[in-house]
Image (cartoon, rainbow, N blue to C red):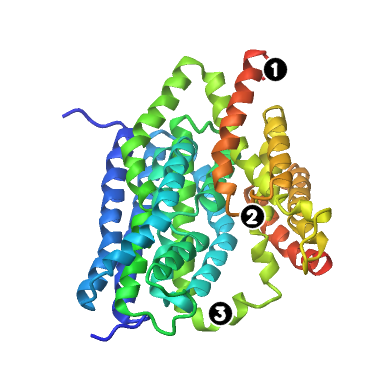
């Protein structure tokens, strides 16, 4: 039998893991229903799904198409199971690629981004476990009003640092999308924390378009 | 068996699934490290990558713990623990839970004790709604990444620019988001200080300035480079406390 390449084996293993996780996630409500003998309220379930699922599915499809090429194979399988992609896993991968000066498209890049995302996933999971075990003593500390602004401003603090590191090295690519996004977010009130996820693919497509023009004109 | 939102059975079920998630992360880490040795990659660099990723993750992970605490008030601990360890986020889960209970004619946060049926409905709405990425990645990632490899084979320079453009595009969207309340300066909301919209902008400025200083300091102390992003993140977050007191 032909030996699988590393990337092919990542896709094979990732598929097995993700489908297993999917089954496990469904087992949670099903087991609860069985153990506590509580069938779902079907009508309310359908109504709840109609109100929720179409939007989440649309966002899920767009996020998958947008983020997979940035996360690489291993990083994608992991990130779409563990979540917090744009605010944690992707910045973590971008920083690791930048630090190691490797291209995301290379096998080294694939490995670096998988290592960064897997480490981040492990640390996140462990910290949440510790948080849950210590939830009683931790709650008054973490919910202290003095700390509230710090956690409320996590994204600006994250993208300030990441922006400088990445934009300064690619400023020719960055000028147009940064100006466009600033204008859109300042002048369109509907754009806010809830809609930033939808603007990511818009911004990505725009940046690719501008970069293509600049590349063709020999500016890049 | 009588149901309540913090029943030990629920902790057990959530714990099993979370251990499986941990297992997947450990497996992928092991697999990537093994391959890195086969390729002869510098193991010191990989250890640095692990250290940086771990340190960088601490602050965002603590903010996820805060989200667990927030959601636990209405949903108990096991469900938010599970949902925020697997795929979810605070806003995602809060909306899904709220839609699920309002479809039953109730309001989340105003229910004294959830029944098992309400709990099952909430969990099913959350699970079905959020599942797309988990099955879509196996379905399309090979093709998508194959396309990237073809691009690389055809024109390596453009492939690198393309990849950078995607990263920049994502960062630009979030830089724009930082300014989303900026217009409050000339279009104030009643009861909110007009300068409130400047808070995220100032925090971003502080974090960016710290990164610049660290960039310069790195020339002398190279090791700082490994921790530049986590340091700028934590100091930026810390700066939000006085900035909010001043402008909020």
Residue A139's disc is 3
Residue A157 showing in the rendered view: yes
Give whichever of A93, B110 is nearer the camera: B110
Q: Residue A152 placed where, x, y %?
A: 65, 63
Compare marks 1 and 3 and give the one earlier in the sequence.
3
| Same chain letter for marks 2 and 1 | yes
Q: Residue A135 placed where, x, y %?
A: 49, 79
Number of residues whose C-alpha sits closer than 10 Å to that of mark 3, classed few (under 14), some (14–19) or many (20 or more)? some
> What residue appears at the point 82 percent right and 64 percent down from the top-left corner?
B247
Q: Residue A28 placed where, x, y %?
A: 28, 66
Compare marks 2 and 1 and give the one earlier in the sequence.
2
**Alpha carbon distance from label 1 to label 3:** 53 Å
Subunit of mark 2? A
Q: Is residue A213 left or right of residue A28?
A: right
**Alpha carbon distance from label 3 to label 2:** 22 Å
Number of residues whose C-alpha sits closer than 10 Å to that of mark 2, classed few (under 14), some (14–19) or many (20 or more)? many
Quickly name the residue at label 1: A219
Subunit of mark 1? A
| Relative to B127, residue A137 above or below | below
Residue B246: quarter of image: bottom right
Residue A1: quarter of image: top left
| Relative to B15, residue B42 above or below | above
| Relative to B24, residue A5 above or below | above
Quickly name the residue at label 2: A155
Labels 2 and 1 touching (C-beta < 8 A): no
Where disc 1 sits, the SS reads loop
Q: Residue furthest left?
A: A1
Where disc 3 sits, the SS reads helix
Subunit of mark 3? A
Compare marks 3 and 2 and give the one earlier in the sequence.
3
């Amino acid at each position: 039998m032909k030996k699988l390449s590393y990337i092919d084996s990542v896709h094979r293993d990732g598929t097995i893991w993700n489908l297993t996780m999917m089954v496990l996630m469904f087992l949670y409500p099903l087991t609860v229903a069985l153990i506590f003998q509580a069938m779902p309220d079907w009508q309310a379930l359908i109504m709840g799904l109609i109100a929720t699922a179409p939007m989440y599915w649309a966002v899920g499809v767009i996020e998958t198409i947008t983020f997979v090429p940035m996360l690489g194979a291993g990083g994608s399988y992991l990130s779409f199971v563990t979540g917090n992609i744009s605010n944690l896993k992707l910045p973590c991968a971008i920083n690791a690629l930048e630090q190691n000066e490797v291209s995301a498209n290379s096998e080294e890049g694939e490995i670096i981004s998988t290592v960064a995302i897997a480490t981040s996933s492990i640390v996140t999971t462990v910290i949440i476990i510790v948080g849950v075990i210590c939830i009683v003593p931790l709650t008054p500390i973490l919910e202290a009003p003095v700390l509230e602004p710090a956690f409320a401003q996590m994204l600006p603090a994250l993208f300030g640092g990441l922006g400088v590191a990445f934009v300064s090295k690619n400023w020719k690519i960055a000028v147009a999308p940064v100006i466009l996004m600033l204008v859109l977010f300042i002048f369109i009130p509907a754009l806010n924390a809830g809609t930033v996820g939808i603007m990511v693919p818009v911004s990505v497509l725009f940046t690719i378009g501008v970069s293509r023009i600049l590349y063709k004109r020999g500016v890049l | 068996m009588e149901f309540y939102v913090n029943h030990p059975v629920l902790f057990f079920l959530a714990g099993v699934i979370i251990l499986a998630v941990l297992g997947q992360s450990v497996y992928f880490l092991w697999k990537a490290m093994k391959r890195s040795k086969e390729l002869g990659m510098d193991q010191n660099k990989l250890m640095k990558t692990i250290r940086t990723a771990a340190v960088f993750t601490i602050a965002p992970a603590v903010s996820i713990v805060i989200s667990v605490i927030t959601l636990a008030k209405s949903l108990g601990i096991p469900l938010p623990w599970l949902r925020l360890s697997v795929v979810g986020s605070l806003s995602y889960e809060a909306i899904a839970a709220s839609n699920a209970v309002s479809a039953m004619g109730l309001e989340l946060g105003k229910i004294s004790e959830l029944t098992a049926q309400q709990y099952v409905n909430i969990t099913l709405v959350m699970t079905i709604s959020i599942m797309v990425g988990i099955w879509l990645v196996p379905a399309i990632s090979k093709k998508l990444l194959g396309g990237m490899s073809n691009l690389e084979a055809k024109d390596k320079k453009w492939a690198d620019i393309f990849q950078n453009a995607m990263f920049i595009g994502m960062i630009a969207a979030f830089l724009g988001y930082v300014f989303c309340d900026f217009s409050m300066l000339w279009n104030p909301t009643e009861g909110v200080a007009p300068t409130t919209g400047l808070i995220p902008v100032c925090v971003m400025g502080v974090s960016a300035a710290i990164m610049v200083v660290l960039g310069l300091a790195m020339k002398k102390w190279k090791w700082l480079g490994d921790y530049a992003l986590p340091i700028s993140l934590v100091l930026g977050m810390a700066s939000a406390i006085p900035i909010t007191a001043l402008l909020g």
